[in-house]
Structure formats: structure tokens, C-alpha cells
């Protein structure tokens, strides 16, 4: 659920009323809503339940929406390359965005550490060749990294982004979910030839400059030469507005000097694509295989459904995102588990209802990536993940610098 339309309007604090459902999430800060605003959201919830009940009564031959056949093949954005002989260890693996991208470039992910059980199950099924440490065993705070020293070439991972994201209220080091110190500890203990840490671009803003310098750069610069790179998903064919920041460190100064950040393979702007001689990135409607509506655009950034106190299948993260989805004629407020189920539940405004495979595609995952867990848990894995084509191109830039030599 997104903040109300009046989020920038000054309202008398006395007008705010608490939710009828108290939050049990320690770090959750409920939106300050008036009774009128809460009533509007209650009506939306009632309408959603009614639509679900009506959908359950629809027989298979009365489907209201045809099943879309996507035009975008995300696997073509990251062709499978031959084995490089380079090994990697994955931390904070989540739904496997980094793991998938690195694997398709020919890097061997030997093991993964992931504290969320459902996400760990996703990696187990998707990457049977990897040793997966999930749940308590995947809690990196409890791991002695000494046995891993000298055993892998690359250490990669995306520490939780909530401490730095706007959705997470940007508490930084005051947020107990801040795991950058643990990522740094692992790098210093294992001493891989290369490390890759990624996060939301807000980590590169002035607000966190002191944190980045003291917590990440200062301790790691003693043994590594570090590049800080920001990339956009649409520049690599992913039909979504999404930016990520990557900290890429090399132990060897010569290899560091050879390193060149990924260059765009796609362009959203027609003139830029023509002038650069690169491929035009698809809009989200075209990528999903939807009929022409007279307007297409990149998808807004999809949010993780794991933020907040309640289970949700909405991928909205702002009012502006809601407005863009409306122009795209796509309904983001209740994602169905499958395309078959999505066609049975028409949206209130008649717009296209998304399914889990559709959201996965918008994030750059292939249709056959076997996410585990309830729908909101899967959407959380997708929303938290690095778009795999971004990971693929980062991995390719590292392999190019290494020359496929350990």
C-alpha cells in the first residue's frame, strides 16, 4: 500500500487516527492517515475480497482475460557462456539475482548463505549444484569464515537495503538489519580476489557518505582497490526504472587497472539507441506481450512485499508509481500467483492484472526460475533482488578484467 495522496499536505496531527489492526513489526512506522483515508483503504480491501470470491466462482471456460505470452526473453539478455573456471561465494542470496547473473556468465557459485527459509529453498531448487546454508545456518553473523579463506575467487552479495532505502526509512547503521559490517568482515576473513557488494543507489547519496567511507571503503581499501559503479536496469534490457550501486574491489592492482564498468547494451530513448547502435529496450507492455494501448513505458520500480507489518501482494511503492501504472493500464495492487489465476480475477478498473511470472520478468528473471513460498514471499524475493541481467553484465566486466585467470 502506498502513502496517501495528501502525503505532502499539512494536516492537523489531531486528525490522524490509528489503524484498527496494530502493527507487530518492531521497525514498522504506520502511515499517518485520517479517518477518511483509512476508510478509503478499507473499501479497497473489501472490494479486493469480493473480487477474489467472485473469481473463485468462475469456471475454466469463462476466463475473462487471455493469458499473455511475453515478447521479452530475459535469457536472451544474458546468454549462457562457457565455464570460466572462476568460483564464487554468495552472501545474502535472496531470490538469486546475483547468483543467476554470475552463473550465466560462466562463474561457478559454490555456496550460498541466506537467512530467509523460502529464499534459501528457491536457491536450492534453482541451483542444485550449490551448497545452500538457509535459515539459522544462513545467518552470516554466526559464521566463522576462516575455513573459506583461499577457497573462492569472488565473494558477492547484496546486504539488506532497508536501512538505506526510502521505504525502510533510511535509518542506516541504527537499523539492526544493516549487514554491511558483516559483508566487510567476510571479505576481510576470506580475502577473495574480487568482491562485489550491491545495494540501493541511496547508499551513494551525501546522507550516507560518512557511513560508506567509514564502514565500507576505509576497512576494505587496506587490501583492495575499489570501483563504485551505479547502473540502470533499462540500460541492459530490463523494462523497469531501477538503479543499483555496486562496490567492486580487486586485490590485484594490475587487474584493478584493467577493469572497465559495464557499458549499456540497450537504450530506452529512440535517438540514443540509434546513435549508439544498441538495442531499444522494450516497454513493459511490449515485454509482457500485451496489446497496444497507445502508450508504453518502463515499469515503475517494483517494491518488495516484505516491508511492513502485513502480508501484501501489491508492488506499489509510491503515488507516482500508481499514476504511471494507471497510464500503462496495468493493475499492481494484487498480483496473482500465476497467469492462469490472474485471468480469473479482473481488476476493478479493467486493467491488466499482473501475475508472479510477469513481475519476475519485469525484474529480469526467466519464467522457469523456481521461486518458493507464498505469493507475497515470492514477490518479496523478486522485489529485493538485483535484476539478473545487471548482475550478468557486472560479472562479465569482472571476467574481462580477470582474463578468466584466477
Image: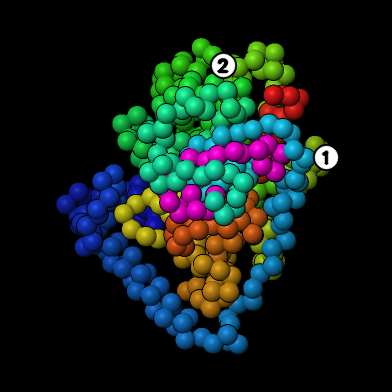
Which element is circle 2 on? loop
> On the rendered image, what quadrant is the C terminus found in?
top right
Residue closest to the eye, 334 or 269 = 334
Quadrant hosting residue 178: top left
- Indicate left or right for 223 with 311 as reference: right
Looking at the image, is 399 positioned above or below residue 258? Answer: below
Residue position for label 2 = 224
Cα separation between marks 2 and 1: 35 Å
Q: Which disc number belongs to residue 40? A: none
Residue 24 seen in the figure: yes
- Indicate left or right for 342 with 333 as reference: right
For image coordinates 50% across by 73% down, the residue present is 347
Magenta-colored stretch includes residue 165 = no
Magenta-colored stretch includes residue 118 = yes
Q: Nearer the viewer, mark 2 or mark 1?
A: 2
Which element is circle 1 on? loop
Residue position for label 1 = 277
- Which x, y percent locates residue 358? 59, 61
Part of the protein shown in magenta: 103-123
- Which x, y percent locates residue 289? 69, 65
Disc with the residue nearer the chain's start (2 vs 1): 2
For image coordinates 48% across by 22% down, the residue present is 189
Looking at the image, is 345 positioned above or below residue 294? Answer: below
Residue extending furthest toward the front = 147
- Indicate left or right for 16 with 326 as reference: left
Amino acid at each position: 500500500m502506498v502513502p496517501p495522496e495528501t502525503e505532502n499536505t499539512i494536516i492537523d496531527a489531531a486528525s490522524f487516527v490509528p489503524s484498527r489492526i496494530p502493527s507487530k513489526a518492531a521497525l514498522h512506522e504506520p502511515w499517518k492517515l485520517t479517518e477518511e483515508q483509512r476508510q478509503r483503504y478499507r473499501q479497497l480491501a473489501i472490494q479486493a475480497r469480493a473480487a477474489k470470491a467472485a473469481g473463485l466462482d468462475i469456471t475454466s471456460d469463462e476466463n475473462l482475460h487471455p493469458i499473455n505470452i511475453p515478447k521479452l526473453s530475459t535469457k536472451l539478455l544474458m546468454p549462457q557462456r562457457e565455464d570460466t573456471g572462476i568460483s564464487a561465494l554468495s552472501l545474502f542470496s535472496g531470490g538469486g539475482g546475483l547468483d543467476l547473473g554470475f552463473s550465466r556468465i560462466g562463474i561457478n557459485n559454490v555456496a550460498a548463505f541466506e537467512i530467509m527459509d523460502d529464499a534459501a529453498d528457491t536457491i536450492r531448487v534453482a541451483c542444485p549444484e550449490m551448497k545452500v546454508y538457509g535459515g539459522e545456518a544462513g545467518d552470516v553473523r554466526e559464521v566463522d569464515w576462516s575455513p573459506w579463506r583461499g577457497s573462492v575467487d569472488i565473494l558477492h552479495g547484496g546486504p539488506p537495503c532497508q536501512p538505506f532505502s526510502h521505504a525502510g526509512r533510511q535509518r542506516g547503521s541504527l537499523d539492526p538489519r544493516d549487514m554491511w559490517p558483516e559483508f566487510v568482515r567476510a571479505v576481510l576473513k576470506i580475502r577473495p580476489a574480487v568482491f562485489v557488494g550491491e545495494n540501493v543507489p541511496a547508499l551513494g547519496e551525501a546522507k550516507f557518505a560518512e557511513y560508506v567511507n567509514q564502514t565500507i571503503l576505509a576497512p576494505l581499501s587496506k587490501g583492495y582497490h575499489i570501483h563504485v559503479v551505479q547502473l540502470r536496469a533499462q540500460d541492459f534490457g530490463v523494462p523497469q526504472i531501477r538503479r543499483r550501486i555496486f562496490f567492486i574491489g580487486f586485490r590485484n592492482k594490475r587487474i584493478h587497472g584493467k577493469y572497465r564498468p559495464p557499458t549499456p547494451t540497450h537504450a530506452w530513448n529512440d535517438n540514443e539507441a540509434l546513435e549508439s547502435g544498441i538495442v531499444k529496450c522494450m516497454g513493459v507492455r511490449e515485454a509482457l506481450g500485451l496489446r497496444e494501448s497507445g502508450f508504453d513505458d518502463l515499469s515503475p520500480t517494483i517494491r518488495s512485499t516484505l516491508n511492513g507489518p502485513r502480508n501484501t501482494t501489491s508492488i506499489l511503492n509510491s503515488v507516482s508509481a500508481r499514476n504511471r501504472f494507471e497510464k500503462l493500464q496495468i493493475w499492481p495492487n494484487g498480483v496473482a500467483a500465476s497467469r492462469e489465476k490472474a485471468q480469473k480475477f479482473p481488476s476493478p478498473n479493467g486493467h491488466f492484472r499482473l501475475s508472479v511470472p510477469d513481475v519476475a520478468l519485469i525484474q529480469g528473471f526467466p519464467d522457469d526460475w523456481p521461486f518458493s513460498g507464498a505469493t507475497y514471499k515470492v514477490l518479496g524475493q523478486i522485489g529485493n533482488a538485483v535484476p539478473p541481467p545487471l548482475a550478468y553484465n557486472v560479472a562479465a566486466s569482472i571476467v574481462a578484467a580477470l582474463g578468466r585467470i584466477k
